[in-house]
Amino acid sequence: MKSIAKNSIHWTYSLAIFCALFALQQQKATAATLSHGWNYAIDSFNDGVTGPQIGGGEFEFYGIAIKETSDTAFIAINSNLSLAGYADPLAQRGNINYGDLFFNFSGQNFNTANANGSLFGIRFAAGNDSGVATTGVYTNVTAKSVTQTNSGFTNLNQFNTVVASQGGTPSMGDLAATDPYFQQTGNSTILNSIATGTKVGEINFLTPATLSVLGLDFGQFNAVGSQTIGFSFNKSSMPSGNYIANFFAECANDAIAIKGSFEAVPEPSTWFGTLLGLSFLGIGAAKRKIKRKIS
């Protein structure tokens, strides 16, 4: 009888742990992903502006993808623009690079979130005109426009008009080209660079080979620009929840936005507490069942 009781308790205990793990894993499995854990936003392939050329030039952005694990976020960009930037004598520095990557968790449009200082930002191009000193993750971010010093567009309406007039198809990945999330008109209203922010984390650059091992595949969408740029950061640098993330070229000759979410992952103490609680429930149920059989 004692052997049967021990086996029953052991079986129920194991089942309780399995159920707890399954339930916690299900939270992760239901996250919105498109392919191998990567959430992709694919941009128009013919809206990059490089001099008189529309589409396919140095400023063509093809896509962005984001993947998360319990503690790390991975970013991948497919583009024709290298991290070294694009030489242009008309730009103030003689070089045009990527602007900064912004994350907005507020549910507000970009300008409102910017006015409230509730944006998060990542400077990933060390040679750009960002207002913060080094690459990394920043909070309490405000944004500025650097298009005018980079021989760029003054507003999005101007960009959209030029692209469409030359037979291109302006878009912004997960957002329509004219989405009111961004201000469309006005002077120097394309906010594409961090103005101020507080650094809260570092970024680690990833090779294309590492990204491939992680399951990244822009080729499945025919997004095959000459550059694949990747980096990761600790998710603790940002909150959980839904976001819109975006970046522009410093000249705003192309841009892309992506909608997604970061999941809140239980702390180790929470995992242990959940498993322990379910284990005790399982043991208690087993003991009650055995007691009923004996009586």
Image: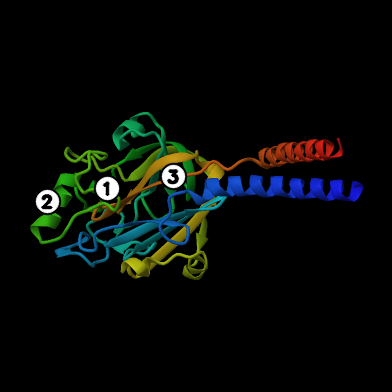
Q: Nearest the camera: 127 or 293?
A: 293
Task: Kindly identify which numbered label has been placed on residue 261.
Answer: 3
Element class at badge 3:
strand
The answer to whether any part of residue 290 appears in the image is yes
Amino acid carrying label 1: it is Leu
Mark 2, mark 1: which one is toward the viewer? 1
Q: CA distance from mark 2 to mark 3?
A: 32 Å
Q: Which residue does the numbered mark 2 point to in the structure image?
A: 161
Q: CA distance from mark 2 to mark 1?
A: 17 Å
- The single residue placed furthest to the top in the displayed view is 116
Q: Which residue does the numbered mark 1 point to in the structure image?
A: 175
Q: Quadrant of residue 113?
A: top left
| Rendering coords of residue 223 (x, y %) | 32, 66
Location of residue 51 with respect to 158 vertically, above or below: below
**Label located before the other in sequence (2 or 3):** 2
Q: Residue at x 22, y 43 (%)?
A: 179
The answer to whether any part of residue 203 appears in the image is no
| Rendering coords of residue 66 (x, y %) | 44, 54
Task: Kindly identify which numbered label has been placed on residue 150.
Answer: none
Amino acid carrying label 2: it is Thr
